[in-house]
Image (tube, helix red, strand yellow):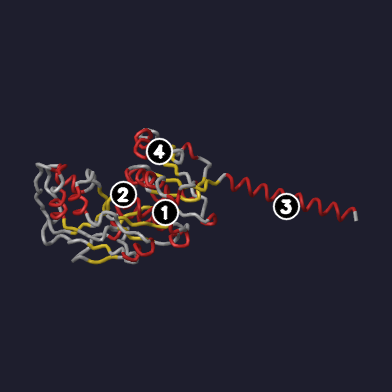
Amino acid sequence: MADQMTTIVYLLLFLLNCRFTTSLSKSSISSGCAVVGCGVLGTSICKQFVKLPEFESQEVVGITKSNTRHEEILTEVGETDRFRVATTEDCVGKKYKNVVFCAPPSGFDDYPAAVEDCMKTVWAGPNEGGIFLFTSSGGIYGFGNDKQVVTENSPVADPSKNPRSARLINAEERVLGGGGACFRLAGLYSLTRGAHNFWLTSGKDVSGRADGIVNQLHYDDAARAVLAGLSAGSSVVNGEVFLISDGHPLTREKICESALKNKHFFGYELPKFLGTNEDPVGKIYDGSASNTALKWDPMYQSFDTFMASGES
């Protein structure tokens, strides 16, 4: 009888220890969100995150390589105890239920490896019920001819023939293989950022054809799409590819004409377009399936709408 009681006591102690150990393991994982790469897009994600009621119980941390822009980022997001900004070194050993990776390829020698490392070291993993969301680019489809329509399921460019796209294509493969999600974004813009700004202010001729098609998306709308993905949950997002644009592609010439409607570009003139009929016209994004799945629509219906609104 005594032996039986001893066995029961040891069993109870073992179970309690397992429960305590599991509790400690869980406590090292933040239920909030980490945004890796806090540039224009990452900052907008953080800024909108803290304002949305569905995330009111969660913290968001913006992770950067250095602290050079920390004060600027904090000012942009606004004062709140639910947001902080940290360097990569500050976050060693910490994991987050949800992770958004939106750092550009330019900051890494081996971009796919950096994305994969983030999945392994910053994300708590799919078993925790969270999301790893990688912001990719629609540019991975390559050049489109004759206004070719592409969707989430369209084939991407051959990475061996497109070195620039290869980094994103290879990064996407690692994300999807690890249970994450890829958001292929159209050309991002704000009032002072985007192709239009360079075309109008550089004083240089534009190499593409005037009637070449460009798909666009405002930075804040891109951030809203990312947050819609986090709201939709892992069952909707993880392992999937989404194509995000405003659904109103414009020609290069029309983009410049629309920008000139805004007082910010007063005094500038249409540039000269050097492209010929031999150059590709471009492709048209159809992200309607993504919009439906995410229950998302752009706030700025088109680049022209934004520029005509006079917003900054």
| Amino acid found under the numbered disc labelled 1 | Leu
| Disc 3 residue crowd, few under 14, some 14–19, many 20+, Cα 10 Å | few
| Disc 2 residue crowd, few under 14, some 14–19, many 20+, Cα 10 Å | many
In front: 28, or 283?
A: 28
- Between the residue at mark 2 and the residue at mark 3, the CA separation in whole angstroms equals 49 Å
Which residue is denoted by mark 3 in the rendering? 15
Image quadrant where residue 265 sits:
top left
| Amino acid found under the numbered disc labelled 4 | Lys
**Residue 38, image x and y in percent?**
37, 42
279 over 50 or under it: above or below: below
Which residue is denoted by mark 2 in the rendering? 220
Which residue is denoted by mark 1 in the rendering? 133
Q: Residue at x 12, y 44 (%)?
A: 204
Q: Is residue 246 left or right of residue 45?
A: left
Which dot marks residue 65?
A: 4
Q: Residue at x 59, y 48 (%)?
A: 26
- Between the residue at mark 1 and the residue at mark 3, the CA separation in whole angstroms equals 36 Å
Task: Please tell me whether mark 2 or mark 3 is closer to you in this view.
Answer: 2
Q: Residue at x 62, y 45 (%)?
A: 24
